[in-house]
Image: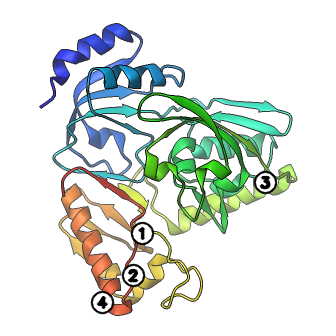
Amino acid sequence: MFPFMKLASEIQTLFPELTIRENVALSEATTFRLGGPCPLFIDNPAADQLPALIKALNQKEMPFLVIGQGSNLVISDNGLDCVVIRFCSDTPDIKTDGSRITVSGSTLLDDFARITVEQATGDLSYCTGIPGTVGGGIAGNAGAFGRQIGDHLVSAEIINLDGDVQTVTRDDLEFAYRHSKLKETGEIVLSATFELPPEDPAILRTERERILEFRREHHPDWHETPCAGSVFRNVEASSAAERRKAAGWFLEEAGAKNMTVGGARLYEKHANIIIGGETCTAQDVWQLSEQMKAAVQKKFDLELTREVRFLGSF
């Protein structure tokens, strides 16, 4: 057991401007609104503070986890026995220099998409409505409609788990479908620079509205309905899928859409999205995801890969 409470005051002394709270329910920090407590919660440090903060936590041998908006996380009902740092801001931090745009990793991805449309700085419209931060979007190579954010990245400033900062290029991050090297290393995006394809501003505005309407019709509104988006990644070309195919198709064919566990059930319009009712627990979501995975394995001899991250004990 780490002496979190004793060391909290030391961290606060080193970083008096930080918001540090003790014994915080992590349900506050995820869009699924699930999760037990963590001993210390540090909310939205500035990007230039994060390296020093991580170095200080390492020096004091305090385990930590950095999260963004928590839009693809399900955290155990037992919580996490570590410091949780939420690197996520409701205030966009975006700078434009000619055709290049630099954005903080803590900026919300949809805010970034919206501002590029409003300022006609290039086409990022396909990221419209995707929850999460820019940093999280880069780590998971977020995208939609056949496009992904890694395609337009020029460079990123990242910080490793020792608190050291370096600048990397798009090639360094080894982007693939819904994947980057950051998923393996755990490194955090402090800022990123993009060069977006140009497009007519009127077309961008129309496309953003079209995508927002599409999401309203097909996806739950996470502001009102607890969820974490698609549970499983779409299926790459294989013997069971001649081309990339939506995981939801396999799940629906396998009869998963009517599955429920406790307070967790499938969204009525999408067989790959679990939503939670009033009694839903994180364990319910885990068990339902296991049943969904098993159903597809049995019918298609195909193992689905999770897109949602489950953290803690399940």
* Front of the two marks 1 and 3: 1
Classify 169 as above or below 144.
Answer: above
**Circle 3 sits on which residue?**
204
The residue lying toward the viewer, choosing from 79 and 126, is 79
Residue receiving disc 1: 232
Look at 51% across and 22% down and name the residue there: 46
Amino acid type assigned to the residue bearing label 3 in the image: Leu
Q: Is residue 313 left or right of residue 175?
A: left
Mark 2 nearby-residue class (10 Å; few <14, some 14–19, many ≥20): many
C-alpha span from label 3 to label 4? 43 Å
How far is disc 1 from disc 3 in space, using C-alphas?
A: 29 Å
Q: Quadrant of the C terminus?
A: bottom left
Q: Which amino acid, mark 1?
A: Phe
Q: Would you call the spot at circle 1 few (<14 residues within 10 Å), some (14-19), or many (20 or more)?
A: many
- The amino acid on which the numbered mark 4 sits, given as a three-letter code, is Lys
The residue drawn where x is 19% and y is 24% is 4
**Mark carried by residue 251:** 2
